[in-house]
Image (spheres, rainbow, N blue to C red):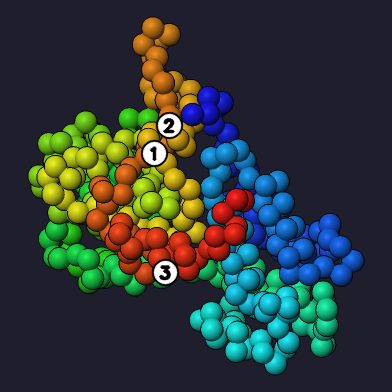
Amino acid sequence: MNTQKAQPRLYSSKESILALKAHLSAKQAKLPKNPTIEDYITYIKKLSNRLKQGPLDFWIPNVFRRVIQVIRLMSSEDGFLPNKDKEKNFKALGLTIQRQSSRSKTTIETGPETGSNANQQYIILPAIEQVLEELEAHSDDINTFASTHFFTNEVLLVYEYSTTVLNFLLSAKKTRNFEIIVLESETENLGKQFATDLGKHQLNVTLTPFTNAYAIMQRVNKILLGVDAILKNGGLLMHPGTYAICVLAKQFAVPVIVLSGAHKLTPKYAFDQTTFNQLVSPLKINPNSTIDQMSIGITFDYVPPEYISLYITNQGQYTPQSIYQLFSDFYNVKDEDI
């Protein structure tokens, strides 16, 4: 376990990809004179290591792994697909060449290119655009499953603030009526803000302390959770307190549904609560505590996959037994060392 104080993130996943795009577009990248596809991949890996903030920053390496995977899929064994084959390869990825987003207006449009310039124009930059598009659309893609998982008048439990969960519930509200119970964490007051934002949309919301979890669990039909990271074995890194909620859910046979963009897939393994964790100030646990009363604070709870019923991602729905398939499709095993 890392004993250093947790640091705030300087770059979001999207910002890190935009930084990569800016470096390449402005020709700031330190590359050989005639870079090959592998030269670009090596540079992207180095930039990922420069941008990530500490060993527990999984998000930046994840999106860079995804960029590299798209690059590998778009490139041939020779490192470049001629312009005439470009559309065919995009279709194989399920992509659209002519993007209708605002970003398409900024795409570099020049004449025929060859060699390293063609690599960058027809493979590297389009790969970056594809990952940016996935990041921006992931919540909408997850919301397509919203109406299929609820019955009318069900009671749903959520914990802490999650924008993905919020959007999912707002989408489900269009076709279903349900009650939401928001558990308030003992470490932060984000649950109150979550309940407030849900209430603004005329949803039936109840805010309750974390200590009431056991008492209310018998009323709950499903639990919806946002995550910080999905590990390769299907385990989760989440807000402290989540593990206790999942243990209770299993005791009461309540399904736990995880909502996450695929960019949070993290090809690493955790074996206990200390494999990936970081100590935080005890004052974050209890701001009014004295020196004698202080306890240790941690950044994450690790939740083993046996406590999860279903993962809903922008790439589809998966069980703990099948989540490995998404890792195989989303990343290349060669890039797990980032």
Where does residue 160 sit, x and y in percent of width and height? Answer: 34, 43
Where does residue 47 sit, x and y in percent of width and height? Answer: 71, 52
Q: How far apart are the alpha carbons under marks 2 and 3? A: 30 Å
Q: Nearer the viewer, mark 2 or mark 3?
A: 2
Task: Return the mark for residue 274.
Answer: 2
Q: Amino acid at mark 2?
A: Thr
Residue 106 in view, yes or no: no
- Local packing at callout 1 (Cα closer than 10 Å; few below 14, some 14-19, many 20+) is few
Q: Circle 3 sits on which residue?
A: 315
SS of the residue at dot 3?
loop
Q: Nearer the viewer, mark 2 or mark 1?
A: 1
- Indicate the quadrant where residue 299 lies: top left
Q: Residue furthest bottom?
A: 84
> In the shown orientation, is residue 204 left or right of residue 66?
left
Residue 87 in view, yes or no: yes
Q: Residue furthest top?
A: 292
Q: How far apart are the alpha carbons under marks 3 and 1? A: 26 Å
SS of the residue at dot 1?
loop
User: Looking at the image, which residue is at 38% across and 47% down?
Assistant: 236
Q: Amino acid at mark 1?
A: Phe
- Local packing at callout 2 (Cα closer than 10 Å; few below 14, some 14-19, many 20+) is some
Task: Return the mark for residue 271.
Answer: 1
Between disc 2 and disc 3, whose residue precedes?
A: 2
291 over 77 or under it: above or below: above
- Local packing at callout 3 (Cα closer than 10 Å; few below 14, some 14-19, many 20+) is some
Where does residue 227 sit, x and y in percent of width and height? Answer: 39, 49
191 over 202 or under it: above or below: above
User: Looking at the image, which residue is at 60% across and 84% down?
Assistant: 89
